[in-house]
């Protein structure tokens, strides 16, 4: 077994164990393997080992790697988890099965337009900037309810859940708790939270999707 597959199997087992430890069904947590900056050959090893859900951060990079991988593994599911420019909405709708970084009105409008045009809708998560960090994407927690309402009522978008990236230097659990609370009061079932360093805490607080990169594919250069 390659090092990558060995790490993948360990993370899978650990995700399932965390789910059970916190009284949840292992299948209620989806492992999103974050393959940004990693070569197609390394991703292929994990596809061959049965991994099916992946996250990428850049439209351009995903375009160079994923069409060929999807041809071999049509059931692979690709999530956009990085900041998305509105002028990339068309390519994103064509390429991704899930977009987790919807975080502003202009992007909602472009996505709605491109979904209508393509006749194909990626599943959508709204990103919330729980730490209110100026450099980070996401709607502010105080704006989330109104934004979700407008996504649905004005743009006709179906929203599956919420995503957050807590500040690196803070304990993540309060951020996971806040995201879960905003989701619950808006009737949303999807919670994308938790990365290599903190996915267990996220599972404890209800994560339905954990996004794990370096713990599977190794440190990024
Ligand atoms: C890179 C990235 C991840 C994966 O981070 P790791 O710490 O390598 O697990 C998860 N979510 C987002 C939004 C990312 O950009």
Image (spheres, helix red, strand yellow):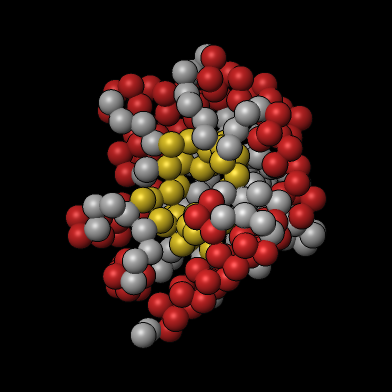
Residue 211 shows up from this direction: no
Q: Quadrant of residue 190?
A: top right
Residue 157 shows up from this direction: yes
Residue 134 horizontal/vertical position (percent): 72, 44
**Relative to residue 23, is residue 214 depicted above or below?**
below
Judged from this view, the residue extending furthest toward the top is 154
Which residue is painted at 36% across and 85% down in the image? Answer: 1
Q: In which quarter of the image is residue 17?
A: bottom right
Which residue is painted at 42% across and 23% down in the image? Answer: 112
Which residue is painted at 60% across and 33% down in the image? Answer: 188
Q: In this view, does 114 lie to the left or right of 6?
A: left
**Relative to residue 80, is residue 201 depicted above or below?**
below
Q: Is residue 37 left or right of residue 159?
A: left
Residue placed most toward the observer, 65 or 221 = 65
**Relative to residue 185, is residue 51 depicted above or below?**
below
**Total residue callouts:** 0
Residue 48 horizontal/vertical position (percent): 29, 70
Which residue is painted at 66% across and 49% down in the image? Answer: 206
Q: In this view, does 142 lie to the left or right of 208?
A: right
Residue 105 horizontal/vertical position (percent): 56, 25
Residue placed most toward the observer, 165 or 161 = 161
Residue 45 horizontal/vertical position (percent): 32, 73
């Amino acid at each position: 077994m390659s090092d990558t597959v060995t790490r993948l199997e360990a993370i899978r087992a650990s995700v399932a164990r965390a789910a059970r430890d916190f009284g949840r069904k292992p299948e209620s947590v989806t492992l999103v393997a974050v393959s940004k900056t990693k070569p197609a050959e390394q991703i292929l090893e994990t596809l061959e080992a049965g991994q099916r859900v992946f996250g990428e951060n850049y439209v351009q990079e995903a375009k160079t790697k994923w069409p060929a991988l999807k041809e071999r593994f049509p059931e692979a599911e690709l999530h956009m988890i990085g900041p998305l420019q509105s002028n990339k909405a068309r390519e994103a709708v064509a390429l991704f099965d899930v977009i987790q970084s919807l975080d502003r009105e202009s992007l909602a409008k472009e996505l709605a337009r491109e979904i209508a045009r393509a006749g194909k809708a990626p599943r959508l998560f709204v990103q919330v900037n729980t730490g209110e960090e100026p450099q980070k994407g996401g709607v502010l927690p105080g704006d989330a309810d109104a934004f979700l309402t407008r996504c649905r009522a004005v743009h006709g978008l179906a929203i599956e859940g919420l995503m957050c990236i807590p500040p690196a230097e803070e304990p993540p659990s309060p951020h996971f708790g806040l995201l879960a609370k905003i989701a619950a009061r808006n009737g949303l079932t999807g919670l994308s939270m938790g990365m290599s360093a903190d996915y267990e805490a996220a599972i404890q607080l209800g994560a339905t999707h954990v996004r794990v990169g370096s713990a599977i594919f190794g440190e990024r250069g």
